[in-house]
Image (cartoon, rainbow, N blue to C red):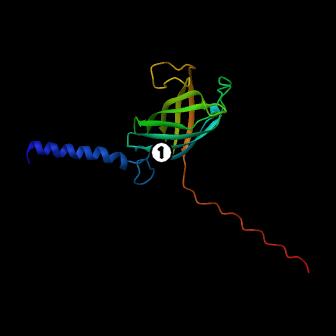
Amino acid sequence: MTARSAARTLSIIACVAAIVTPALSGDADGPGGNNGRGVCRTDGAWIGSAPDFGITFMAVYDAESHWWGTIDLTWIGGDPTFLGSFPDAVAFSEVKGQWKRTGRRTFEYTMISYGLDATGQPVFIAKNSGWKRLLEGCHSSEIEGAIELFAPHQDPFGDDPPMYGCVGPAFAFEMQMSIDPPCEPPPPPTPTPTPP
């Protein structure tokens, strides 16, 4: 084997190892696990809360690759008027976003949602950006971000600053949903016999 073909073979092996290692390096505790030192994934459904805003949420993270993916999120509760700043807003739209991996268990994200009036028209655009860190075991995380508030006619990814400013920092916590067995309802009551 020539030095050139040996170098090529080693290069291929290194590339395969770099691709396969993240998928095989889980974060499970106990025998055979990495005891909290592995690579976490965000795929799946999560539930969370942002106590400062009085809001809970459900999120689905979908990995397009090991390094990035998409977010579909639904806000539950909260104040779409932002403490009266947008009195015409009555609800939040669905939230769409993207995430990218920055480390074994750390991610950055950006999400967009709209504050909607009673007719479903946008009152403002909320651009939420920040970071997420999965905790030991990879089934819970802490999130920190800030929300930029744009006018409906603005490009939230353009050069203009947000017309209505920035709110934050905002903190949230989330847990990955588990697969649980169904509940067992109690048996129906035994009918009381009626006397003859």
Q: Is residue 81 above or below residue 190?
A: above
In the drawing, does residue 113 fall left or right of residue 109? right
Instruction: Provide residue 64's location: percent of width, then percent of height.
Output: 40, 43
Give the labeled residue for mark 1: 138
In the drawing, does residue 15 fall left or right of residue 39? left
Q: Is residue 123 above or below residue 95?
A: above
**Which residue of the protein is positioned furthest toward the bottom in this rendering?**
196
Q: Quadrant of residue 92?
A: top right
Say which residue appears at 46% left-offset and 46% top-offset.
43
**Which residue of the protein is positioned furthest toward the left in this rendering?**
2
The residue closer to the viewer here, 83 or 186, is: 83
Say which residue appears at 72% left-offset and 68% top-offset.
187
Instruction: Provide residue 132's location: percent of width, then percent of height.
Output: 49, 35
Say which residue appears at 48% left-offset and 18% top-offset.
160
Say which residue appears at 54% left-offset and 40% top-offset.
73
**Which residue of the protein is positioned furthest toward the right in this rendering?**
196
In the drawing, does residue 82 fall left or right of residue 31? right
Amino acid type indicated by mark 1: Cys
The residue closer to the viewer here, 11 or 90, is: 90
Instruction: Provide residue 86's location: percent of width, then percent of height.
Output: 65, 24
Q: Quadrant of the C terminus?
A: bottom right
The residue closer to the viewer here, 92 or 182, is: 92
Instruction: Provide residue 133's location: percent of width, then percent of height.
Output: 48, 37
Estimate how packed mark 1 is, as few (under 14), some (14 to 19) or many (20 or more) residues with alpha carbons within 10 Å: many
In the drawing, does residue 88 fall left or right of residue 47? right
**Number of callouts in the render?**
1
